[in-house]
Image (cartoon, grey):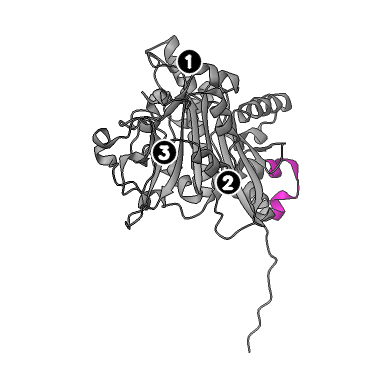
Amino acid sequence: MSQAIDGLASEELLRRVIAVTTTTDMEALLATLPIVSENDSSFDATRAADTWNPGHLHWMPVGGDRGNAGRIKLANHPVNPLAERIVNGMEALIELHRTRELNLNSHAAPPESPRAAVGRYFGLPALDQIPKIEDKAERARLWGIAREIARGLRLKLSTVRIKGQPSFTIMIEDDGIGQSADMVHRTLLSLGSTTKGDKPYMIGLFGQGGSSAFSISRYSWVLSRRAPEALGDRKDGLGWSVIKQVFPRGRRDDYFAYLAGAPDGRVLAFEAAAADAVGMAHGTRFAHIGCDFQGVGGSSVTRNLFPALNHVLFNPMLPYELYAGRDTADPMWGNAYRLSNVKLRNSTAAVSLDKTFPPQQVTTR
């Protein structure tokens, strides 16, 4: 079992992991852990059971595929993987409500679409329809529901300066269904596999998009805890790992790898009591550290994140919160909501959004 590695299931270590927000912090943490180097040829991930060094952590390829770099690097803009992570969080919130529904009625038919799921479980129409509701009391009621839902899905941007240059960290937190520690490597750290094929109420399908966030960051860490009503016969606890791009000495095939605590690829786990102590009841946290915004730096990253996310997630299934370098949140509704709201409140909006031109005189020579 991964917990057999001394000192790697303590509340103290969990608090240290949660506090890691810079590359310097991460490298200091990794230096204290018993990790077999990616350059140690004695370990072969394809024959992990035969070459495992007991009492140590090992770098295992994400998705079990050493050729994963090409697929993980598919994102053509750094905001896209972050949007994928947010969508994953929306799915986790929907899946939690579906599980609760099945616990009450195991024969309950699934919602026919993600939008139908949001209507059934959260009582919300499409977000861009809320401003169009004429009844002020009903509009305020729905806005209040949406605002409360947004608190369960958060994207946080923080910035520090390292050697005079800004370094960005993005954290995505959801209070959804989460994963049990023994399943993190098969779900959150998988690649190209999915459990959503028979779930019409889910948004994604191919198990690819969120992993692209590994390619825009120097390091990532993940924590996940399964909601108690979805545990079944699995043990409660908090699975965790670190992810980075690996460049083995003497080889050309770089890849993305995560820290595994057992030959079968399972990640390490903290006991439920440690998770309770840091206030993580259920859900998933991803931190992407040292993010590369493709030459964009300084305050422009903070300023541009709000419009960029509202553009990419034009009419999101659920709202979420953005903490862009500050402690207060901007509720994120998507540009469809914002445009709908402008048309309702500004009588000149139609003119400004759909500009017309008077006839123009044309002369010829």
In the figure, 359 relative to 96: above or below?
Answer: below
In the rendered structure, which disc, 2 or 3, sits on the residue that comes first in sequence?
Answer: 2
Taking the image as shown, residue 59 lies to the left or right of residue 100, namely left
* Label drawn at residue 24: 2
Quadrant position of residue 55: top left
* Label drawn at residue 35: 3
- The residue that appears at 43% across and 35% down in the rendered structure is 34
- The residue that appears at 45% across and 10% down in the rendered structure is 104
In the figure, 57 relative to 72: above or below?
Answer: above
Q: Main secondary structure of the magenta part?
A: helix
Residue 227 on the magenta span: no
In the figure, 365 relative to 212: above or below?
Answer: below
What is the C-alpha distance between the residues marked 2 and 3?
17 Å
Taking the image as shown, residue 145 lies to the left or right of residue 108, namely right
Kind of residue sitting beneath label 1: Pro
Which residue is tagged 1? 228
Magenta residues, start to end: 341-352
Kind of residue sitting beneath label 3: Ile
Q: Nearer the viewer, residue 120 or 290?
A: 290
Residue 45: x percent and y percent?
29, 40
Residue 230: x percent and y percent?
44, 17
Quadrant position of residue 64: top left
Which residue extends farthest top? 104
Residue 354 visible to the viewer = no
